[in-house]
Amino acid sequence: MAIFKKGVKSKLGWFLIAIFPALLIIAGYIWGEKYFGSKDQFQVWINSAGFAAPFAFFIIQVVQVVVTPVNHYIIGVLGGTMFGLWPGFFLNWSGRTIGSIIAFFIGRKAGRPLVKKFISNEAIGKYDKYASRGGWILFLIYFLPLFPDDEITYFAGISKMPIRIFIPAMLFGHIGGSIGLAYTGAGIKVRDPLFYVIIIITLVCGLVLTILMRRLNKKKKI
């Protein structure tokens, strides 16, 4: 079929995939701040749930992964502010993992058929091959709280990344971002040994991610 051939449609498909995360990030800054203006507004809304506040926070964490424009940094920090370091970490981690699983399967069921209409089978095959090698890269992206990892989850779903690679990379990867944001919300203490542990681990993981990305880019050029 013509729609699977290389050409204008293939380039358009890759262009849409490339700008999709950027558009979601922009939407997050525009509408996320408009409708979910600040950490204080979230806190008031969650506290209104009374004894069910932890559950309300958990639901928000799940939804903010699936509906990516919601600012996940505000939510993650709020977990530590409201519930303390370790409860906040657990609520951050559990909500983000459940939301990531939902987003992954949405991408797999709804996104891939759409991508196939624009991109050739050969190009999709190459994309899948690179994605299947990216287990450690995905883990580090989740682990470091600096990336649009919610959007990355949809990309993982669109690719043919095996579920056996995605699940552990996501489960363990979310530990870093969840504890980092909860720690920020609970109050950073420079004299706390945990502060230096987080800093060192973050720097090492950032270096490893850079090396892995460079190696993957070299393989793509070969």
Image (spheres, rainbow, N blue to C red):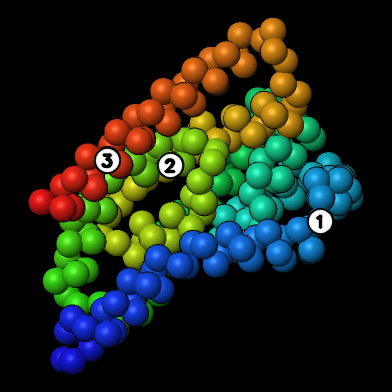
Q: Are marks 1 and 3 in contact (CB under 8 Å)?
A: no
Picture residue at 28% right of the left edge, 37% below the top: 212
Decide if residue 116 is in sight here: no
Left or right: where 1 falls relative to 47: left
Picture residue at 63% right of the left edge, 66% below the top: 27
- Quadrant (top left, top right, bottom left, bottom right) of the N terminus: bottom left
- Mark 1 burial class by Cα count in 10 Å: few <14, some 14-19, many 20+: few
Q: Position of residue 132 (x, y in %)?
A: 23, 51
Work out whether mark 2 precedes mark 1 in sequence or the reverse, and give the earlier one. 1
Residue with the mark numbered 1:
37
Q: Quadrant of residue 171?
A: top left
Q: Amino acid at mark 2?
A: Ile
Picture residue at 53% right of the left edge, 15% below the top: 197
Q: Quadrant of residue 199?
A: top right
Left or right: where 222 falls relative to 17: left
Q: Position of residue 125 (x, y in %)?
A: 17, 65
**Cα–Cα span, label 2 and label 3:** 14 Å
Residue 141: which disc? 2
Residue 142's place in the image compared with 185, above or below, is below
Q: Position of residue 194 (x, y in %)?
A: 60, 14
Residue 166: which disc? none
